Image (cartoon, rainbow, N blue to C red):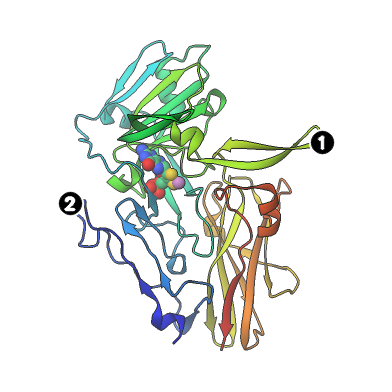
Amino acid sequence: MSKQTTRREVLKGGAAIAGLGALGFPQWGLPALAQGETLVEFTDLPDEIVLERTPDRRIIEVRDIDGPITPADKWFTTQHYGHPVIDRATYRLRVSGMVNSPLELSLADIRAMPSRELVFGFECSGNRGPQNGLSSNGRWTGVSLRTVLERAGIEEAASEFVFFGADRGEEEVDFRGRTSTVEQQYGRSLRRHVALSDEPMLAYALNGDPLTIHQGSPLRLLVPGWYGAPNVKFLSEIHVQEDQYLGKYQTHWYRTLKSQTINGETKWVETAISKMRLKSYIARVTKMGNGHKVFGVIMHDGTPIQSVEVRIDDGPWQPATLDPSTSEKYSWKFFSYDWNGATPGEHTVTSRATDTSGYVQPTAEALSESKKTFLEQNNQHPRTLIIA
Ligand SMILES: Nc1nc2c(c(=O)[nH]1)N[C@H]1C(S)=C(S)[C@@H](COP(=O)(O)O)O[C@H]1N2
Ligand SMILES: [Mo]
């Protein structure tokens, strides 16, 4: 039996949230292929593809990507503490701590501020091949974080900006082997130069519609070019302080153990998840007539892309073409490669991206030498398939 006939979507969990379909999410569409274009199945996928569709986790089927903007009901999601239902009418964003005037802003107050649009695609820092389904791209509307912070007036000594979501849960906090169980909120922090830069925004809409509960309704933080974790959903308060924030999701859960060369010496250091590391992944291969087409996606931190290349088996790297419909700075980028003269049999197709800083997407072997934890897994991912 081929992978196609045995392929079965394994559904996990139930539809805990009212107002959604029986499975919690609408069914996915079929791939938007041109007439006469057929999908070549990858042979590197498990027989049973686990497409988790619990309310807390949704993985996109990258083979079905049919346009630059991911519809809200297909956007990938990961959520730690359930989905608080917040009344838009009584919602207030609090800004507190080292500010001249603490704020309590209604949604109407925020919507009355100068608005901004941003095309921004991000991935979860745990996203990895072969499926790479924890990535999406959207057009967001909101206000500059700086506009809100300037309204509150930031004290000079303030250096740490903590963003709390309204979602909360019990956590065991370990201290030298002794644990305390306490209630925590999802929290992330930004340092002053990032928080007060032009880039971060507070978004209330995705693709022209108010955020749904899966995108953190009614308001979320977005840090363009960064991984998903800092994009705090259900944003309820911004607390400005001097001390570093050491919450679980800032310093423990979303961290990477990597090697750095400092003064000529290799040091293994733990870092918090921040900017996306340049990655390309192959989403699908199709056949049309006698030719084949490789289609893929680049996730990156906004540094312009110098090149993206594809190689078949152990052949030479060949230039692929970037799709101009994804050229906005923080958009994910699409690329395609015309594979002519594909011979029958099993093949490996690999892509690699290079940005204008000179950074080249590493191989899995090279990456494993410089990084121990599995987040920020941006290595080249060879896909395997059989040409009939
Ligand atoms: N309040 C809150 N914000 C959160 C999270 C969360 O659990 N709670 N998860 C983070 C993580 S790990 C990711 S990858 C992104 C996912 O955003 P999405 O669900 O809109 O795709 O949200 C981030 N923001
Ligand atoms: Mo994530």
Q: Nearer the viewer, mark 2 or mark 1?
A: 1
Label whose residue precedes the other's in the sequence (2 or 1):
2
**Which quadrant would the C terminus be assigned to in this image?**
bottom right
Residue 276 x %, y % = 57, 45
CA distance separating discs 2 and 1: 57 Å
**Which quadrant would the N terminus be assigned to in this image?**
bottom left
State yes or no: Cβ of the residue under disc 1 lies below 8 Å from any atom of ligand 2.
Answer: no
The residue at the point 52 percent across, 31 percent down is 198
> Could you tell me the amino acid type at mark 2?
Ala
Say above or below: 365 vs 348. above
Residue 313 x %, y % = 69, 75
> Which one is nearer the viewer's eye here, 129 or 93?
129
* Residue pointed to by mark 2: 18
> Which one is nearer the viewer's eye here, 162 or 10?
10
In the figure, is residue 23 to the left or right of 354?
left
Residue 340 x %, y % = 65, 81
The quarter of the displayed image where residue 259 is located: top right
> Could you tell me the amino acid type at mark 1?
Gly
Say above or below: 83 vs 291. above
Q: Specify few, some or many for label 2: CA neighbours under 10 Å numbering under 14, 14-19, or 20 or more.
A: few
The residue at the point 59 percent across, 59 percent down is 280
* Residue pointed to by mark 1: 264
State which image quarter holds ligand 1: top left
Say above or below: 256 vs 143. below
